[in-house]
Amino acid sequence: MKSSEIPPPAGDAHVDHLRFHREHEHLAKPFGGDMFGLKAEAFARLFGTPGFLGVQTVLVAGWIAANVTGLVKFDVYPFILLNLAFSLQAAYAAPLILLAQTRQASRDKALSDADAKHREAISLASAQQSKQMLELLRQNTELTEITKAMAQRIEKLTAEMHCHFLEDKREH
């Protein structure tokens, strides 16, 4: 693991929280960042919306009603032109949707990999902090033992001095 992947210490004002995702930014747009890609993405997203399905249903119902009632006669039953329109729509929709799914799978995998790297870096940082905490605890225990020994020695010296002063007073 590179040192740049280990999270900086807590409190660092310059933490790049997206550092593991930066290498996957090129996958942000499903069909690329150019004009065609943006329009293709918008077109593919449109196919799955309730609004599109509603408008399409109204248009098809109107198309059939107009031709069945004789209001117009450009596509009489069995509605060959309508069938051709659906085929054309399917010819464009299917590849765009498959392309969107493939790109989404690539983005999902890239984000999953970035998240795994992030979790690994957090785990490494946590292990380092645990080692530091254990060392600090060991040092604290050592200092406590030294303090205890010094307190016992002070108590012993105080007792000895007390006895010594009492003996000096008795002699006078």
Image: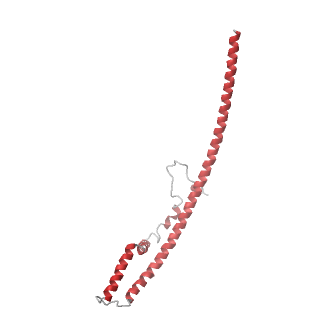
Q: Nearer the viewer, residue 53 or 141?
A: 53
Q: Note whether 145 is above or below 93 in the view shown.
A: above
The number of numbered badges drawn on the structure is 0
Residue drawn 62% across the image and 46% down it: 132
Q: Note whether 8 is above or below 161 in the view shown.
A: below
Instruction: Residue lying at the far top in this picture: please name it.
Output: 172
Residue 45 in picture, x, y percent from top left:
42, 72
Residue drawn 55% across the image and 61% down it: 114
Residue 1 in picture, x, y percent from top left:
61, 58
Residue 35 in picture, x, y percent from top left:
41, 72
- Is residue 63 shown left or right of residue 23? left
Q: How is the image coloured?
A: secondary structure
Q: Note whether 136 is above or below 16 in the view shown.
A: above
* Quadrant in the rendering for residue 38: bottom left
Residue drawn 31% across the image and 86% down it: 66
Q: Could you tell me if residue 101 is visible in this image?
A: yes
Q: Nearer the viewer, residue 72 or 97?
A: 72
Q: Could you tell me if residue 3 is visible in this image?
A: no
- Is residue 30 shown left or right of residue 134? left
Quadrant for the C terminus, please: top right
